[in-house]
Image (tube, rainbow, N blue to C red):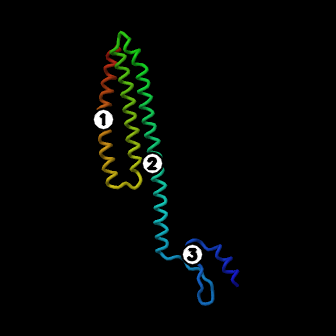
Amino acid sequence: MLYIPSAFTFCVTYFQRIIWKGGWYTIATATENTHANNIVNFNHFAEGILLQTAFLLKIGIESIALLILALAILKSTQKLPSVLKQKNRQAALLSLRLNLGMALALSLEFLLAADIAATAVSPNWDALGKLATISGIRTFLNFFLQKEVEELEAEKSHNST
């Protein structure tokens, strides 16, 4: 007789339990508190996974931004000695500044995306305040950098004609 309930418990789900009632074994479902606790636990688990994913995404995007910046600086540094030796230095320096400015603008865009990814999952007011401040500063820098790049492009096209 004891073998039947013990074999039967393998078919019972996590939210159910077997109880003895009036000479019979019956299945009693878990209370609402148990369901609520399980839902809260699952939410914490899912939020933890999302936080880790957002953190890894942030690191990846910041790495891309730094790589863009490092490659642009290396490329500009390599071209600088040959640019300084040219007779038409102004046009060559203009082109060099234009390429570096575009790389800086692209890098700022990636860094802004990384900050947004970091605060995408359950942000608190402190994180939102930091995001607003950092995004404001980066957007301000990017706006004026874009203006300078546009001016450099216009000057470059004016000089080439």
Foreground: 85 or 123? Answer: 85
Q: CA distance from mark 1 to mark 3?
A: 59 Å
The tag on residue 63 is none
Q: Earlier in the sequence, mark 2 or mark 3?
A: 3
As drawn, 34 above or below 57: below
**Quadrant of residue 135 in the image?**
top left
The tag on residue 16 is 3
As drawn, 89 above or below 125: above
Residue at 38 percent of width and 26 percent of height? 100
The spot of residue 42 in percent (x, y) is 49, 63
Q: CA distance from mark 2 to mark 3?
A: 37 Å
Mark nearest the camera among 2 and 1 is 2
As drawn, 107 above or below 37: above
Is there CB contact under 8 Å for labels 1 and 3?
no
Q: Earlier in the sequence, mark 2 or mark 1?
A: 2
Query: Dot 1 corresponds to which residue?
Result: 141
Q: CA distance from mark 2 to mark 1?
A: 25 Å
Q: Inspect the image, locate mark 3, and give the three-letter code of the amino acid beneath it.
A: Gln
Query: Dot 2 corresponds to which residue?
Result: 55
Q: Find numbered disc 2 in the image and state the secondary structure of the residue it sits on.
A: helix
Is the residue marked by circle 1 packed among few (<14), some (14-19), or many (20+) residues within 10 Å? some
Q: Inspect the image, locate mark 1, and give the three-letter code of the amino acid beneath it.
A: Leu
- The quadrant the N terminus occupies is bottom right
The spot of residue 77 in percent (x, y) is 41, 22
**Quadrant of residue 124 in the image?**
bottom left
Mark nearest the camera among 2 and 3 is 2
The spot of residue 18 in percent (x, y) is 60, 80
**Quadrant of residue 140 in the image?**
top left
Q: Earlier in the sequence, mark 1 or mark 3?
A: 3
